[in-house]
Amino acid sequence: STLPELDEAVTGCRACPRLVSWRERVAEEKRAAFRDQEYWGRPVPGFGPSDASLALVGLAPAAHGANRTGRMFTGDRSGEVLYRALFDVGLASAPHSESAGDGLRLYGTRITAPVRCAPPANKPTPAERDTCSPWLAREFELLRPTLRVVVVLGGYGWQALLAVLAAGGWEVPRPKPRFGHGARATLRDPAGAELVLLGCYHVSQQNTFTGRLTPEMLRAVLGRAKEAAGV
Ligand code: SF4
């Protein structure tokens, strides 16, 4: 399959009963508050071109962000911070991501997550993470010919992605690289090509409101990633 086909297929997934009922209940309850928009309420596919050399990996869609709009990091405060920084370093065509139909483009960059449905309290169970991991594995397989660098937003994504890549034949250094802001790990794919992982604190409000992650810090990581990926 191709990446657009994968994106289409994931939106129909109903493999996690708890997440299916949660995402649909939130959509049902909140539809009235967002009456002028279609409320997505389904799994959220990755966003960005099929030949990306840079990927961003988060955690999962937010209940009223991506679960509402259908595009990763779109419709909430975390996304505002992220897209502003992507635009500032030249990776996005506009500083705001409003909705899936706004025409925004990412340059050489794909945004995705290890869990595609909004989980209660932003906490998927280990079983839900494992059930969803084939989607991420397939996405990384399809991106493999062009992918050079991954910015991982937060420790959850770091652990989940390392597990997916190791299972997919990427050679993970030992001891296993630890997550941290500024962490860097180099993996080798089965053909010997290098894939660089860069750790960055997640753009959640807990981090951005408290100053743990400042816009400058985020721009610095994205700028470094852009250069390393040759975008
Ligand atoms: Fe499917 Fe992933 Fe959503 Fe579970 S979290 S229902 S595996 S898309």
Image (tube, rainbow, N blue to C red):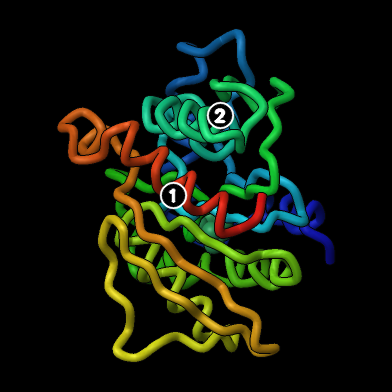
Q: Picture coordinates of residue 16 (x, y %)?
A: 49, 60
Q: Which residue is mark 2?
A: 87
Q: Which residue is mark 1?
A: 60
Q: Picture coordinates of residue 10 (x, y %)?
A: 67, 55
Check the image and name the residue furthest to the top. 36
Q: Residues within 10 Å of mark 1 (few under 14, many from 20)?
A: many
Determine the residue positioned at 41% across, 69% down.
Answer: 160
Residue 74 numbered tag: none
Within 8 Å: ligand 1 and the Cβ of disc 1?
A: yes
Q: Earlier in the sequence, mark 2 or mark 1?
A: 1
For the residue labelled by badge 1, is the local secondary structure a helix, a strand or a loop? Answer: loop
**Of 110 and 221, which appears nearest the observer?**
221
**Of 62 and 125, which appears nearest the observer?**
62
Q: Picture coordinates of residue 86 (x, y %)?
A: 53, 35
Let me know if residue 42 appears in the view: yes
The amino acid on which the numbered mark 1 sits, given as a three-letter code, is: Ala
Residue 14, image quadrant: bottom right
**Of 224 and 36, which appears nearest the observer?**
224
Determine the residue positioned at 45% across, 21% down.
Answer: 30
**Of 213 and 131, which appears nearest the observer?**
213
Determine the residue positioned at 32% across, 84% down.
Answer: 176
Q: Which image quarter holds the N terminus?
A: bottom right
Determine the residue positioned at 41% across, 38% down.
Answer: 219
The amino acid on which the numbered mark 2 sits, given as a three-letter code, is: Phe
